[in-house]
Each structure stands twice: as structure tokens, then as C-alpha cells.
Image (cartoon, grey):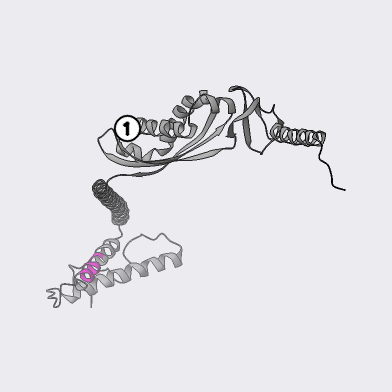
């Protein structure tokens, strides 16, 4: 028996197909990190967030599919003229994130192109107000200024510019060579300055050493002079005391004291003459008897002193019995 397709069956099938299409058109699955705008008869009514969303088929439609994740744009290389008229090539990158999908979809046309052109324009403005040396040494300052300007300009578009980085600043080849020569000259200058400062410090240290050496030498000479003067003073005091003792002995009647005094001086003078380094032959027009007489006087003086000590008498009484001493000017006794 053949199946008969009635008009009711066709109607039911049509209703099922319409319902199926209605469900397909009404249910929307939004992926994570995106938002879709909904338009009703061309007017924005809301946004679908990640997950399942529903719209009215044939009345509502999906407008713009906005990526809410942080995105990056490459800024193409462009020529920039600096404040000191140097031509440099500059490129960079821009990091941004959409915060309001409705503003990003309806406040600006072609969002990425707008961000890119705005960034390139401000790069020329900011970098054109700087000298080349400042441009090469202060990239952080340039990045901060660009970020501040571009972020303020794109805020009405519902986006947040998180970072702007200058990737490369390329001066012309001839300018690079000039900078290399300048850097070399600066380094040679610093090296010469350091060498001159080292020579100066060495000269100062040598002068200080010589000064200290001279001071120590002068202090040593002064100390030696003081000690020599003190020695001469003590020697003079000893001579004066010896002279005084001899004088007292003579005044007491002891003639042998002066014989002793003159004899010791006589022998010391002979010893000094004999020990002189510049004398090889010594001519002595002296009488040996005088020296012997002086030595005899010394011996008699010593004998008198021993006798006085043995008898317990005073040591300076007078000439001993048995003979008197002779001085250098007298002949010795036989």
C-alpha cells in the first residue's frame, strides 16, 4: 500500500522545518574572549557575551563581532625628522584591548586602521620634538609620552592602549659613521684626561714623598746636632771639672796633679797624630825623654795615691819622699 502524502503532512513538515530554522537563527553561541553586537532593524540593542545567546529571528541580527582580548598591531617603518634635522627610520608595536564592544563597533570605522594611523602620527610628533642624542638614549620617555597621548585619544572608542614600544630607531649610514667617530673621539678624550690625572696624582705623590723624606732628614740632622752639642757640652763640663780638680790639687800643694793632667793631654795628642788617615810618615821632632818623664809623673801620682790609701792619710799632701815627677818640659831623673 503506497503512502499517501496529505496536505496536512506537508504542513506539519513545513512547520517543523520553520521551527528548526527559527531555533537555528535564534540561538547564538559566542566564543570566549568575544562579544557580538545585536541590531534590531539596523539599530544597536545590546551585546551577546560569551556562551549561548538568543535573538529574535528575522528581526534581530548580529552586527559586529568584537575581539575583547588584548591585541597587538605592528607599526610600519616610517621616516622621522628630529629636532636637529636628522632623518631616522622608526617602527614599533601597539598593544590594546577593547573594553566597550558597542563603542568599538559604532564610534569608529575600521578600529585597527584608526589606532595605527593615530600612533604613527604621534610618533612623528613626539620624536620630531627631540634631538637625535635624546632620541637614542630616552626610549622609555618616548614610550611613555606616546602611550599617554594615544590612550587619551582612543578612550572614546572604548579601547585601552596598554603599551606602545619603539622597536627600532635607525639613523642613516653616514650619520652612524659620524656618531662612531664622535664616540671614538670622546673615549680618546676621556682616556687622555684619565692619563693626565694619573700623571698628576703620581707627581703629587712623588712630591709628597720627597717632602716627607726631606722633613725626616732635617729632623734627623737636627736630632744629631742636638746630641752632638749635648756631647760637646758634657765633654766641656768634664774638661772643666777635670781642670777644676787639677787646680784644686795644685792649690793644695800637689804638683803631681798637673804632671798627670799634662801627661794625659800629651799622650792623647800623640795618639791623634799617629791615627790620622792622611799621614803615612810622621816626623816627630820631640824628645822621648819628655814623654817618659810625663809617664813617670803619672806613675808617681798613682804611687802616692796608693800610699795615702794604705796609711789612711789624705791623698793630696805633698810630693813623696824619694823624688818629684817631671813634666814634659823637664828632664827625667836618672
Above or below, comparing residue 102 to residue 334 in the picture: above
Task: Mark 1: give few (<14), some (14-19) or many (20+) Cα within 10 Å.
Answer: some
Question: How many marks do you count on the picture?
Answer: 1
Q: Main secondary structure of the magenta part?
A: helix
Report if residue 268 lies within the magenta region. Answer: yes
Q: Which stretch did the figure color magenta?
A: 265-272
The residue positioned farthest toward the front in the image shown: 1
Q: Nearer the viewer, residue 181 or 288?
A: 181
Q: Nearer the viewer, residue 54 or 294?
A: 54
Q: Can you identify the residue that label 1 sits on?
A: 128
Above or below, comparing residue 318 to residue 33 in the picture: below
Relative image position of residue 96 (x, y in whole percent): 52, 35
Relative image position of residue 155 (x, y in whole percent): 51, 25
The residue positioned farthest toward the right in the image shown: 1
Q: Is residue 223 left or right of residue 288?
A: right
The residue depicted at 23 percent of the width and 75 percent of the height is: 292
Answer yes or no: is residue 100 visible: no
Q: Nearer the viewer, residue 104 or 23?
A: 23
- Which element type, helix, strand or loop, lies under badge 1? helix
The residue depicted at 69 percent of the width and 33 percent of the height is: 25
Above or below, comparing residue 176 to residue 255 in the picture: above
Above or below, comparing residue 276 to residue 178 in the picture: below
Answer yes or no: is residue 258 visible: yes
- The image quarter containing residue 308 is bottom left
Q: Nearer the viewer, residue 260 or 71?
A: 71
Relative image position of residue 229 (x, y in whole percent): 28, 52
Amino acid at each position: 500500500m503506497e503512502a499517501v502524502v496529505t496536505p496536512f503532512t506537508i504542513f506539519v513538515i513545513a512547520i517543523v522545518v520553520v521551527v528548526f530554522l527559527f531555533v537555528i537563527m535564534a540561538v547564538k553561541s559566542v566564543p570566549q574572549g568575544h562579544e557580538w553586537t545585536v541590531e534590531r532593524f539596523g539599530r544597536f540593542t545590546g551585546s551577546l557575551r560569551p556562551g549561548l545567546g538568543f535573538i529574535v529571528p528575522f528581526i534581530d541580527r548580529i552586527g559586529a563581532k568584537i575581539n575583547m582580548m588584548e591585541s597587538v598591531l605592528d607599526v610600519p617603518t616610517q621616516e622621522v625628522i628630529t629636532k636637529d634635522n636628522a632623518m631616522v627610520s622608526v617602527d614599533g608595536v601597539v598593544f590594546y584591548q577593547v573594553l566597550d564592544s558597542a563603542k568599538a563597533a559604532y564610534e569608529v570605522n575600521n578600529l585597527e586602521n584608526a589606532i595605527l594611523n593615530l600612533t604613527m602620527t604621534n610618533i612623528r610628533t613626539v620624536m620630531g620634538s627631540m634631538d637625535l642624542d635624546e632620541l637614542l638614549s630616552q626610549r622609555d620617555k618616548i614610550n611613555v609620552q606616546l602611550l599617554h597621548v594615544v590612550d587619551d585619544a582612543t578612550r572614546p572608542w572604548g579601547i585601552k592602549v596598554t603599551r606602545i614600544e619603539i622597536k627600532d630607531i635607525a639613523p642613516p649610514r653616514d650619520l652612524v659613521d659620524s656618531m662612531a667617530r664622535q664616540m671614538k673621539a670622546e673615549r680618546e678624550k676621556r682616556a687622555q684626561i684619565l692619563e693626565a690625572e694619573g700623571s698628576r696624582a703620581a707627581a703629587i705623590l712623588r712630591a709628597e714623598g720627597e717632602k716627607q723624606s726631606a722633613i725626616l732628614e732635617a729632623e734627623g740632622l737636627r736630632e744629631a746636632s742636638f746630641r752632638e752639642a749635648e756631647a760637646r757640652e758634657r765633654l766641656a763640663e768634664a774638661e772643666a771639672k777635670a781642670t777644676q780638680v787639677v787646680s784644686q790639687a795644685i792649690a793644695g800643694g800637689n804638683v803631681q796633679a798637673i804632671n798627670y793632667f799634662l801627661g794625659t793631654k800629651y799622650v792623647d795628642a800623640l795618639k791623634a797624630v799617629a791615627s790620622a788617615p792622611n799621614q803615612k810618615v810622621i816626623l816627630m821632632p820631640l824628645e822621648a825623654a819628655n814623654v817618659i818623664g810625663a809617664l813617670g809623673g803619672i806613675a808617681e801620682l798613682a804611687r802616692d795615691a796608693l800610699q795615702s790609701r794604705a796609711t789612711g792619710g789624705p791623698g793630696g799632701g805633698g810630693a813623696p819622699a824619694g823624688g818629684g815627677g817631671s813634666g814634659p818640659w823637664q828632664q827625667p831623673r836618672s
